[in-house]
C-alpha cells in the first residue's frame, strides 16, 4: 500500500516545481531502485484516487493535492482550553463552491460594500444566476454599467444598495440584469 509519506513527497514536488514529477523523479523522491516499483506505486495511488492520468498517460493531480486538514474550531471570544481534533480534510474548492460549472471569481474594486465585509482587493466567488433573492449580494448590470451590490426588493420596487453610507441606493432607470450571486469571499492577510 502506498504510504502517506510517499504521496506527500509527490505533492511537495508538485508545489515546488508547478508540475507533476516524471516516473524517474518519483523513483528518486521515494528512494526506489526500480521503475517497476514506481509503476506499482503510481497504480496504487491511481486506485486510491490520489493520482490520475490523462489520455496520453501523463500523471495529473487530484483533489487530494489541494486538501487542507480541518482541525476543528477556535473561540473568538474568551479563551478556553483548545482541543485539537482532526476532522476529514477538505479542499477549499469543495468548501467554497457548490456549482463549479456556474462559478467564477472576480476581484473587488471600490469600497461600496465595506460594511458587508467586502473590501477592495478581495476576491468574490460568484455563481452565475439570473434570479436573486432579497438581501443577496449580486453582480448586476444596471442601465449598461456593472456593479456589486445588495439586491433589495420592496413590493415591485427593486433597488441595489451599497454597504457603505457614502453611496446612495441605485434605482434602475431602464434595465436591471442579475448576472451572478456572491457565494464566497476570499481575502489574504
Image (spheres, grey):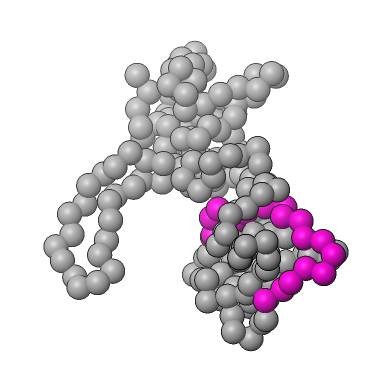
Q: Give me the residue at 27% from left, 61% from top.
A: 74
Residue situated in front as seen by the camera: 21 or 144: 144
Pick the residue in front: 50 or 9.
50
Numbered circles on residues, count: 0
- Horizontal placement of 71 versus 148: left or right? left
Is 71 located above or below residue 170 in the figure?
A: above
Give how far across and how far down residue 91 sits, in percent: 46, 42
At horizontal 65% and vertical 19% (from top left) the residue drawn is: 57
Residue at left offset 65%, top offset 37% = 101
| 82 lies left or right of 63 | left
Q: Is residue 174 magenta?
A: yes
Please, is residue 166 above or below residue 152 in the view?
below
Q: Nearer the viewer, residue 96 or 82?
A: 96
Quarter holding the N terminus is top left
Whole-percent x, y for residue 161 in the image: 63, 72
- In the displayed orientation, state which residue is furthest to the bottom: 166
> Which portion, as a residue range, is magenta?
169-186
Query: Would residue 107 be visible to someone looking at this image?
Result: no
- x, y percentage for residue 188? 52, 65
Q: Is residue 29 visible?
A: yes
Amino acid at each position: 500500500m502506498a504510504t502517506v509519506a510517499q504521496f506527500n513527497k509527490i505533492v511537495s514536488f508538485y508545489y515546488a516545481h508547478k508540475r507533476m514529477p516524471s516516473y524517474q523523479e518519483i523513483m528518486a523522491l521515494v528512494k526506489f531502485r526500480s521503475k517497476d516499483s514506481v509503476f506499482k506505486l503510481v497504480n496504487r495511488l491511481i486506485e486510491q484516487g490520489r493520482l490520475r492520468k490523462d489520455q496520453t498517460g501523463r500523471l495529473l493531480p487530484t483533489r487530494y493535492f489541494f486538501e487542507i486538514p480541518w482541525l476543528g474550531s477556535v473561540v473568538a471570544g474568551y479563551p478556553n482550553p483548545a482541543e485539537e481534533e482532526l476532522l476529514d480534510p477538505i479542499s477549499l474548492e469543495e468548501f467554497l463552491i457548490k456549482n463549479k460549472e456556474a462559478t467564477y471569481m472576480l476581484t473587488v474594486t471600490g469600497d461600496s460594500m465595506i460594511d458587508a465585509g467586502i473590501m477592495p482587493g478581495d476576491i468574490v466567488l460568484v455563481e452565475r444566476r439570473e434570479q436573486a433573492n432579497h438581501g443577496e449580494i449580486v453582480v448586476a448590470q444596471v442601465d449598461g454599467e456593472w456593479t456589486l451590490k445588495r439586491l433589495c426588493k420592496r413590493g415591485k420596487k427593486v433597488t441595489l444598495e451599497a454597504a457603505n453610507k457614502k453611496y446612495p441606493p441605485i434605482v434602475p432607470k431602464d434595465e436591471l440584469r442579475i448576472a451572478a450571486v456572491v457565494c464566497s469571499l476570499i481575502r489574504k492577510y
